[in-house]
Amino acid sequence: MASNGDSISTLHPDIIQTQILTRLDGPTLTSTASTSSYLQSLCTEQKLWQELSTATWPSINDPRVVKAISSFPSGYRSFFADSYPFSEYTWPSEKDDPPTTGLISAVDLYYQGDLIYSRVQEMETESGKGGWFLSTPFRVDMLGPKESIKTRIRYPGGDYEAWVRDMEEDMKLNWILIDPVKKRAANISSRDAVSASRNWLTGDLEVRFSTVVMGKSVAEVATVVSCGSAETWKEVDEEVGGEVDVREVRLQVEDIEGKCLKGRESVGILQGLLEGKRSCKDGCGEERRGKGRYEGYVELKTQWRKEKKRREKTQDTICMIFGLSLFVLLWSFILLR
């Protein structure tokens, strides 16, 4: 191809856009745009990026998201550039930017490549009356307390552990966070599950999608999908199996102790992901790196707990020695009298 794009310019632009460019994924489309000024003009068409974005994340067809994307610098092209690669956490800037008064969550859940759940939810990030939001544990629930999602997922019975491993492999989750004020978006989910385990209290299977952030402190942005039967798993014969519903899809931010952070700290961490640089190291060919990072984080938590236990043991020993010494001193004082 000539550098000025003369050879391809002989084709009608409609043919290029409808028969060629629509078959490309985002990174390839971006690379194609850099080959010539002619292709760049065709590759930056809003409709092209809109179709690519909505095919990747069906939830963004929601009018609230469409309105937010329309304010982005380059519309859907900017949105895709923000949401497709992984976000690298940076500490939020202290510039005089407009305050973030609300965030939008656009969630798409897949099982074995099929979309089983899609929803958009708005979230106010201001303190509100009584300051409850910023001072209470942060959590976003995409399903109501009595709501569940019927799926085609089935636990066949028998080897439960093998089924759990399959569920971890078969589920994919995109959780896109959108800031309409600052005109930024970020996919805060690991896309692939990083773990799957049974909740000891409810009996439900919890599939976790995690993004580990490293800033002034270490934290985990966890999106969790909770699956169970119409009855609790404790009441289901594991040899017989049964149908599986999705009963929870939630977002929470946890510290290294596993405690849910409050609204103020959580919004700060989410803002750091929105403002962070974008990296293709995770999103462009290394899909399982997110699990590797999570496993490293789990190891760090284990080491932290061991160190905490060691410190507590040392403190207990010091207190015991101090108490014993005080007792001996008092006893000696009594004897001398």
Image (tube, grey):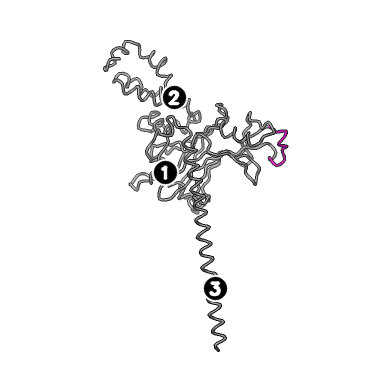
State the image coordinates of residue 312 (x, y, percent, origin top left): 52, 61
Front one among 304 and 271: 304
State the image coordinates of residue 193 (x, y, percent, origin top left): 53, 36
Among all residues in the image, which is located at the extreme bottom? 337
Whether residue 143 is visible, yes or no, is no
Among all residues in the image, which is located at the extreme top? 10
Q: Spatial distance from mark 1 to mark 3, Cα to Cα?
A: 48 Å
Tag 3 or tag 2, which sits nearer the N-term? 2
Front one among 330 and 194: 330
Answer whether residue 215 is magenta in the image: no
Q: Spatial distance from mark 2 to mark 3, Cα to Cα?
A: 70 Å
Which residue in the structure is indicated by mark 2?
Answer: 52
Q: What residue lies at 63% left-to-right and 28% top-to-bottom?
A: 152
Answer whether residue 238 is magenta in the image: yes
> What label sits on residue 271 in the rendered view?
1
Amino acid under disc 1: Gln
> What residue span does the magenta drawing correspond to?
232-242
Which residue in the structure is indicated by mark 3?
Answer: 323
The secondary structure type at the circle numbered 2 is: helix
The secondary structure type at the circle numbered 1 is: helix
